[in-house]
């Protein structure tokens, strides 16, 4: 389960985005803190200096008692302490005084330094008469602490908001991928009646369109596969039944020599028929795998089509179809076997999809190219390409189809 969660694209997206948000927030916080805290400390130090100087001025120039002056300038964010003598000042562990600081105090000058346990907070000490006045920011309520609090709040809001937006964004990105995954499972289970709606023009939409195209092709191939198996079963069944029947008949000792010869001829003919069927299957397999062995020769194209029409005569006569044939005498250099299969397929389909009493038209003429037209009054079928030329169909539902073969 943990491994599956780790390899999930949804989880990986969220992990990456959250990692980026967290890392960028930390770096931003660090940069801002590094650049701004010094300014804030300088501002606090100036406040302390101004307050100490002002209080001393009030005491010296205005003769205001020190305690009263301190109360007058008392602020919530600045803590001011009065030390009666130097010994009392040294006893306060918050303030660290160097020898140089002590000399400055003896001269009546202000000392500025950092608090012992808070290196980020400054303090100031100024002699006022015989006393010492120390001022430092309140440990909890000061500008540095306020800035840090604001930054922590901003960082927390940024991470939470970024996380929520990331989850929503990733969910929107992954949703079509999940749909494609589900659809792919359906296709793998043999369900080709599925189609996805692409949204937009991004890579996922393009993938969706290609997926729909793939499913459409698989559905067509599945239909052809089933139809092929049905056709092959039917085509092989007839000659095999004939071979079996006439072979059994040959065992009848009462047959005359003439009857035996007739049975042998039929068996030979059916055997040839099976051989042709096997060859056609092999050729079809080669075509499916793009292995095309052209056996080009010069032959009469119109005579080939006539032979095909005669070959299928039993079928079109059984449906009482009217055939209108207009063909010029045309010689052609190409693959005779493959083209014969083309005419068989087209005319067979025309017969199959034309209702009883309908009509089939076969036209052949030659201009710059050979043009073969096979029309029917049936229900109409789809388009295809073939044999270094063009094959197209003009079709309208309920009114029939016209096939064009251009070589």
Image: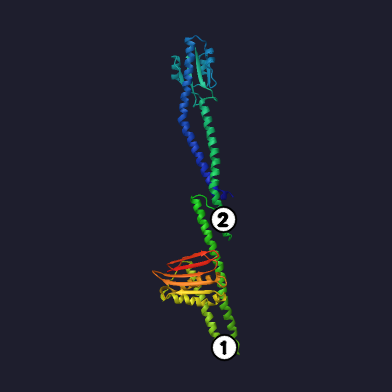
Residue matched to label 2: 183
Given the current orientation, which residue lies at the most extreme top position?
A: 63
Image coordinates for residue 209, horizontal then vertical, percent: 51, 55
Q: Quadrant of the C terminus?
A: bottom left
The mark closer to the camera, 2 or 1, is 1
Nearest to the observer: residue 52 or residue 332: 332
Residue 338 visible in the picture: no
Please tell me whether mark 2 sits on a helix, a strand or a loop.
helix
Q: Quadrant of residue 184?
A: bottom right
Q: How is the image coloured?
A: rainbow
The residue at the point 58 percent across, 83 percent down is: 246
Mark before the other along the chain sequence, 2 or 1? 2
Residue matched to label 1: 259
Image coordinates for residue 323, horizontal then vertical, percent: 51, 74
Say which mark, if any, is on residue 248.
Answer: none
The residue at the point 48 percent across, 36 percent down is: 27
């Amino acid at each position: 389960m943990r491994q599956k969660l780790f390899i999930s694209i949804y989880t990986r997206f969220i992990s990456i985005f959250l990692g980026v948000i967290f890392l960028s927030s930390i770096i931003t916080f660090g940069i801002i803190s590094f650049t701004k805290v010094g300014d804030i400390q300088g501002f606090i130090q100036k406040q302390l200096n101004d307050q100490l100087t002002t209080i001393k001025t009030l005491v010296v120039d205005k003769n205001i008692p020190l305690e009263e002056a301190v109360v007058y300038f008392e602020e919530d964010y600045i803590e001011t302490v009065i030390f009666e003598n130097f010994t009392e000042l040294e006893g306060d562990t918050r303030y660290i005084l160097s020898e140089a600081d002590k000399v400055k105090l003896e001269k009546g000058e202000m000392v500025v330094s950092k608090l012992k346990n808070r290196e980020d907070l400054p303090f100031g000490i100024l002699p006022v008469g015989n006393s010492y006045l120390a001022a430092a920011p309140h440990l909890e309520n000061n500008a540095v602490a306020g800035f840090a609090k604001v930054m922590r709040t901003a960082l927390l809001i940024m991470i939470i908001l970024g996380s929520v937006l990331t989850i929503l964004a990733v969910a929107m990105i992954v949703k079509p991928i999940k749909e494609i995954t589900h659809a792919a499972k359906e296709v793998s289970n043999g369900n080709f009646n599925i189609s996805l709606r692409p949204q937009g023009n991004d890579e996922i939409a393009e993938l969706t369109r290609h997926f729909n195209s793939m499913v459409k092709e698989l559905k067509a191939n599945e239909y052809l596969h089933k139809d092929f198996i049905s056709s092959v079963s039917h085509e092989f069944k007839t000659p095999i039944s004939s071979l079996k029947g006439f072979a059994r008949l040959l065992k009848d000792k009462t047959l005359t020599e003439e009857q035996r010869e007739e049975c042998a001829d039929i068996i030979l003919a059916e055997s040839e028929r099976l051989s042709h069927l096997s060859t056609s299957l092999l050729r079809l397999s080669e075509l499916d795998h793009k292995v095309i062995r052209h056996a080009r020769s010069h032959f009469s194209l119109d005579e080939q089509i006539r032979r095909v029409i005669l070959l299928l005569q039993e079928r079109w006569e059984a449906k009482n179809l009217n055939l209108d044939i207009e063909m010029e005498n045309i010689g052609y250099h190409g693959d005779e076997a493959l083209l014969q299969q083309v005419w068989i397929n087209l005319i067979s389909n025309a017969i199959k999809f034309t209702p009883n009493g309908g009509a089939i038209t076969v036209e052949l003429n030659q201009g710059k190219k050979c043009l073969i037209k096979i029309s029917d009054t049936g229900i109409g079928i789809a388009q295809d390409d073939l044999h270094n030329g063009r094959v197209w169909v003009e079709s309208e539902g309920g009114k029939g189809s016209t096939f064009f073969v251009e070589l």
